[in-house]
Image (cartoon, helix red, strand yellow):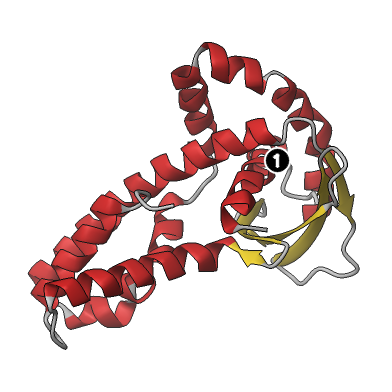
Amino acid sequence: MKWQQALKLCGLVLGLMWHTNVSAQPQQSAYDVVVATTDSVMQVLKSADQKEQSDPDQYYADLKQVMDQVVDYRGFARGVMGPFAGRSYYQSLSEEGQQRLRQQLQEFTAVMRDNLVETYAKGLIAFANATIEVVEPEQVSEGRAMIEQRISRDNDQPYRVLYQMGQSREGQWQLRNVIIEDVNLGEIYRSQFESAAKRAAKAAGCGDGDSACLESVIDTVISTWGAEE
């Protein structure tokens, strides 16, 4: 399965988690939270196609409003940037460079927000008629859980989805990462960023320790993010 298809499916996956976070109680297990919201989310998906066709801008805006309540875009963006937003690189910069890196992280967070919302909105439509089975985990570590779902559409073989979940300080379960079949979405995005940065650095002729050049490289990756599929 191509990773682009995995991203579409992830729209359905995160759709489940958005409603989960809104209605979940802290004492619920990660498994209970996912099971309890499946039926209501499928009802939402039944009308999603009509909404997208009649008023796509409003559909995306409504979806973005829901996602903004539960998705840690900044943390996700920092993870995607990897070493380019890591502590080691940050501490190697001057005070001015550190300030600029914080600005770049803010800029990339906004880019990722728009990119993810659009991708997931399309994913919700593509899997509006899916059938979902949630598999109860045999064991759950304190503060962490791996919940498996099997998502079927038409006569296709079920997709195996793994939620990597963690608990907030308030005890609510939150989605940390998604693995669809053998596609780790967090790693895919991070690999994309790293590859784009290497190409930009080579084109710019950046030398070792050239922080000004690397700053320009990061700007280039952010400004062109999502342009290549």
77 with respect to 177 (left or right) = left
Residue pointed to by mark 1: 16
The secondary element bearing badge 1 is classed as helix
92 with respect to 21 (left or right) = left
* Amino acid tagged 1: Leu
- 201 vs 6: above or below: below
Pick out the residue farthest to the top: 54
> In front here: 168 or 200?
200
Q: Residue at x 69, y 66 (%)?
A: 143
Q: Quadrant of the N terminus?
A: bottom right
Q: Residue at x 62, y 42 (%)?
A: 11
| Residue 128: percent from left, percent from top | 73, 30
Viewer can see residue 78: yes
> In front here: 52 or 117?
52
> In front here: 31 or 215?
215
Pick out the residue farthest to the bottom: 208
> In front here: 102 or 148?
148
- 175 vs 131: above or below: below
The quadrant in which residue 92 appears is bottom left
Q: Residue at x 21, y 56 (%)?
A: 103
| Residue 7: percent from left, percent from top | 58, 50
- 137 vs 126: above or below: below
The quadrant in which residue 14 appears is top right
Q: Residue at x 72, y 36 (%)?
A: 127
| Residue 40: percent from left, percent from top | 78, 28
Viewer can see residue 94: no
Q: Residues within 10 Å of mark 1 (few under 14, many from 20)?
A: many
| Residue 64: percent from left, percent from top | 48, 32
